[in-house]
Image (cartoon, helix red, strand yellow):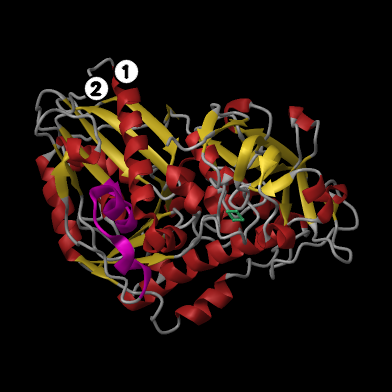
């Protein structure tokens, strides 16, 4: 007997059919929408809210706890809890991510002999793929010239199972590994088809692929069980490199073409960190240099005194827009960046579109402006200044409501809804910046490096392209705070993968780099907890 299915309409996605008992969260994924689900569907974060209609099972205890009676009455549900019992529909407001694939328009400089990684001049095309916890990036590369024929970005579809690596791992351990893997492989496959069309080549013609990412993402993608990474001693299923036939991973590629990773060093220092360090040139001799890859997990690689050290700090996804009330990834036309001009606000958006959310760069700028205006104390407490141009943008703080700073009000710059930063958002940002700063300081102390002796601080990650270095220094994100040594190197993990794709010398340098990195475990390092507590504070207002 065929099982009964129902028609479900999800706004912004395709109409789909669902079985009784399916959750709205699962149905939204089927319809091509990824919904914020920071707790991985446990019913504790409240991020998966939707306005639903039609036939659904009654609200669960978790929904009754997180939603007010009025919200429940007006049809608000938690998508991870709301189960289908008949035809239904739902609208997600600002908490769903489309499965759209977009141009990844960051500048890319092909490898050259200046960096010692000139292309080997092999004919044909290859793929560089970076599997980030939040975002996937891929590039179709001409193997002969090293030039990018097309570049693509898309949300990591696993985001509906949690915002960070820890929640993905717990979902994998509780039986979700197959869902994590198949969703990821399907999305990468679609991205490669998209790239081939854009680049004017036949999908399935790629001769080689280099895939980077953190050890959990790579393990899931390559078919390993990552559960050992979830608990001490955080052992990854493989170190060094892994390889497989590209087609077996769902990558459209030439018959027999291989997909391989760059080296994985430890449970939380993966091929993405090695790749970014390669691109930053940390394998070459020089003075003390620090590279920070600002992702959900911030990997840091320090080259000093002929040695290379690495650690990873659980920064959380605040600087990627997750766990932030109006948070957004840095996507074209959607994000708010905020700068201070004469004490007033100057708000800009990526692509100049109406403001919709706050990306990591915008969040850091916002914090810097609030600190300068006196509205934000070094402790992280938000208080309304009595006067001044931004005083009327602060609200709340009375009994039962948290203080909130309104960067954009509805109607301003064509915004449909407010873009605000709350006290809770500031706490999330403090945790992220505290983890990064304390991690860097602890690593430098272990390596005997003084911040004043740093010759360069390389910032990698999607956020690293547009980040205002003054704002980053103002909020105390970086050690050795001198603007002249801060260099943004963009998505260096993807760029390093592209270098390794076209140059055997780059692959060899990556292998040597992976072998020579000394992994440093932060969680058990003496002094880390104290540094972390101190690093959560913002530098005092100097004015
Ligand atoms: S409440 Fe967290 S995903 Fe639904």
Is 523 in front, or is 63? Answer: 63
Pinpoint residue 299: horizontal percent, then vertical percent: 37, 60
Q: Which image quarter holds the C terminus?
A: bottom right
Residue shown at 88% from the left, 48% from the top: 392
- Seen from the viewer's position, the closer of residues 227 and 497 is 227
Principal secondary structure, stretch drawn in magenta: helix
Residue of label 2: 203
Instruction: Classify the position of ligand 1 by quadrant: top left, top right, bottom left or bottom right.
Output: bottom right
Instruction: Give, as a single range, the part of the protein colored magenta.
Output: 212-231
Q: Which residue lies at the image location 68% right of the left edge and 29% below the top edge? A: 354
Q: Say above or below: 28 vs 532.
A: above
Q: Can residue 479 be seen in this view?
A: no
| Left or right, 219 with reference to 160 | left
Q: For numbered disc 2, what is the local secondary structure?
A: loop
Q: Mark 1 points at which residue?
A: 197
Q: Would you say 265 lies left or right of 409 here?
A: left
Secondary element type, mark 1: helix
Query: Residue 481: where, in percent of width, then height?
Result: 50, 61
Q: Residues within 10 Å of mark 2 (few under 14, many from 20)?
A: some
As drawn, the residue found furthest toward the bottom would be: 526
């Amino acid at each position: 007997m065929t099982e009964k299915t129902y028609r479900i309409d999800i706004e912004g996605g395709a109409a789909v059919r669902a079985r009784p008992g399916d959750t709205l969260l699962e149905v939204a994924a089927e319809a091509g929408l990824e919904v914020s689900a920071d707790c991985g569907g446990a019913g504790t974060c409240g991020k998966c809210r939707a306005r639903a209609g039609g036939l659904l099972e009654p609200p669960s205890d978790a929904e009754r706890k997180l939603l007010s009676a009025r919200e429940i009455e007006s049809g608000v549900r938690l998508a991870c809890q709301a189960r289908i019992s008949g035809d239904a529909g739902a609208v997600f407001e600002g908490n769903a991510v489309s499965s759209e694939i977009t141009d990844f328009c960051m500048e890319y400089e092909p490898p050259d002999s200046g960096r010692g990684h000139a292309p080997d001049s092999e004919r044909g095309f290859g793929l560089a793929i970076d599997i980030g916890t939040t975002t996937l990036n891929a590039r179709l590369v001409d193997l002969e010239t090293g030039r990018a024929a097309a570049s693509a970005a898309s949300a990591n579809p696993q985001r509906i199972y949690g915002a960070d690596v820890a929640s993905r791992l717990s979902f994998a351990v509780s039986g979700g590994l197959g869902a994590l893997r198949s969703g990821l492989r399907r999305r990468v496959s679609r991205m490669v088809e998209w790239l081939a069309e854009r680049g004017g080549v036949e999908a399935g013609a790629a001769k080689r692929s280099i895939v980077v990412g953190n050890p959990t993402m790579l393990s899931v993608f390559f078919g390993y069980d990552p559960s050992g990474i979830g608990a001490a001693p955080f052992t990854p299923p493989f170190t060094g490199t892994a390889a497989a036939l590209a087609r077996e991973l769902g990558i459209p590629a030439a018959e027999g073409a291989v997909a391989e990773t760059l080296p994985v060093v430890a449970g939380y220092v993966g091929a993405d960190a090695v790749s970014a360090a390669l691109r930053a040139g940390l394998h070459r001799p020089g003075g003390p240099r620090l590279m920070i890859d600002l992702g959900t997990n911030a990997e840091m690689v320090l080259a000093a005194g002929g040695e290379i050290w690495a650690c990873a700090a659980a920064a959380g996804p605040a600087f990627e827009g997750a766990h932030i009330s109006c948070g957004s990834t840095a996507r074209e036309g959607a994000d708010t960046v905020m700068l201070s001009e004469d004490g007033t606000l100057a708000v800009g958006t990526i692509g100049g579109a109406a403001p919709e959310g706050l990306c990591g760069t915008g969040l850091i700028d916002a914090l810097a402006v609030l600190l300068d205006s006196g509205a934000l104390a070094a402790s992280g407490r938000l208080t309304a200044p009595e006067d001044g141009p931004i005083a009327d943008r602060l609200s709340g703080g009375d009994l039962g409501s948290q203080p909130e700073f309104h960067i954009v009000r509805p109607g301003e710059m064509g915004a449909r809804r407010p873009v605000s930063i709350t006290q809770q958002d500031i706490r999330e940002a403090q945790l992220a910046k505290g983890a990064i700063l304390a991690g860097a300081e602890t690593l430098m102390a272990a390596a005997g490096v003084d911040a004043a002796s740093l010759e360069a601080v390389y910032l990698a990650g999607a956020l690293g392209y547009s980040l205002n270095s003054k704002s980053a220094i103002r909020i105390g994100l970086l050690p050795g705070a001198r603007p002249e040594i801060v260099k943004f190197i963009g998505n260096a993990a993807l760029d390093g993968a592209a270098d390794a794709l076209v140059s055997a010398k780059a692959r060899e340098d990556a292998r040597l780099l992976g072998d020579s990195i000394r992994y440093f475990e932060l969680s058990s390092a003496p002094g880390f907890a104290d540094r972390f507590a101190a690093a959560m504070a913002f530098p005092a207002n100097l004015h």
